[in-house]
Amino acid sequence: MTLPYPPDDDPAAYRYINAALRSRDAEAWRLLAADSHVEQTDRVVRAMLDRIAVARTHRTAQRAKARVQALAGEISQADYQRDAAEDATRATKTAHFETMLREQHRSIAQAARRLRGDDVRDELTDLVLALGSAIDAHRAAVLASGAEPAASDRALWDRLAALDVPGSAGGEDRTSVEDLVQRHAARQDDLGRVLAGIILDVAGDATSVPRSALLTVWKKTVAPTLAPEQKTEFAAKGKGSLATERLRKTMGHLERKGLVKRSDSPEGQRLDLLDRRGLEDLADGVEP
């Protein structure tokens, strides 16, 4: 059995996906995840989620406008309350539909990533980034020491400058590894400043803070800054929360700077403050 439309007929895919969601037909979703159609299914579901998000934003603006009109007497309170109740009913149905759509999209996105080889590409990019970052850190340490770099050092640095990797789906054909490392370092420093401020606020005068306390504040601060497509893409990899993953990596960034250290306790993981002044400087944006 195959799907009743070709992999380039997105309107037909939209109608089929809608019907599959409402019927909860497992066989339909197996077909939608087949290699011949999974990238189309992924594309169409993403577009559906985008439309839901746009509609939600429009609805919120309309509710705010109606509230102002009701307060100004431009519409009656009875009309406002009736429209608000109808809107709440529509919002509940839409939220239920969106939940079902996202549940199905997790497996679809994973299948699409596997077919495109995205997981392998991401693993290789992470490996290249780790190696490039290590070379960059080595270069910074050698130059900061005032010692004359050895010929092998300069050869290593020249090699880093010459390397590039295939670009992402964003449109770049090739990306310099050195540029990739610098952009990664800049993002890490930006998030490091955020985390340093959170650590200092949560710790107060204490020398150690529970990771769970940091996570709560971190999510409230960082999660709203993450694009929905970033969170969806990360969730599709089956790795949990993107905000939590960013916290883990940022903690590692601060550890490498010698500012904090993770430790275990009977109550759970904690973060020990090793260099309060360094954390304060980082939070204030002071260059080391």
Image (cartoon, rainbow, N blue to C red):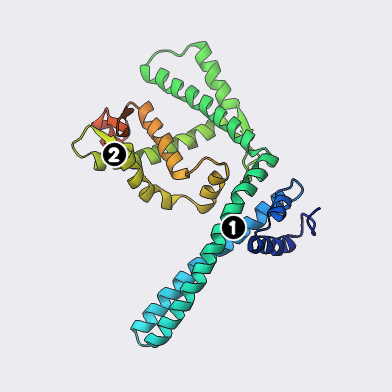
Answer with left or right where residue 100 lies relative to residue 200: right
Quarter holding residue 46: bottom right
The secondary element bearing badge 1 is classed as: helix
**Picture disc at residue 237:** none
Of the 4 image quadrants, the one containing the C terminus is: top left
Task: Locate residue 211, reporting x and y percent.
Answer: 33, 37
Answer with left or right where residue 246 lies relative to residue 197: right
Answer with left or right where residue 264 lies relative to residue 88: left
Residue located 62% across and 32% down the image: 165
Task: Locate residue 131, reporting x and y percent.
Answer: 53, 24
Quarter holding residue 52: bottom right
The amino acid type of the residue labelled 2 equals Ile
The amino acid type of the residue labelled 1 equals Leu
Task: Locate residue 216, reporting x and y percent.
Answer: 34, 46
In this view of the protein, can residue 161 be seen by the observer?
Answer: yes
Above or below: residue 176 compared with residue 20: above
Above or below: residue 80 compared with residue 246: below
Residue at the disc numbered 2: 199
Circles 1 and 2, Cβ within 8 Å, touching? The answer is no
Residue located 72% across and 60% down the image: 13
**Picture disc at residue 101:** 1
Q: Residue furthest left?
A: 205
Residue located 46% across and 14% down the image: 149
Q: Of circles 1 and 2, which is in front? A: 1
Mark earlier in primary sequence (1, 2): 1
The secondary element bearing badge 2 is classed as: helix
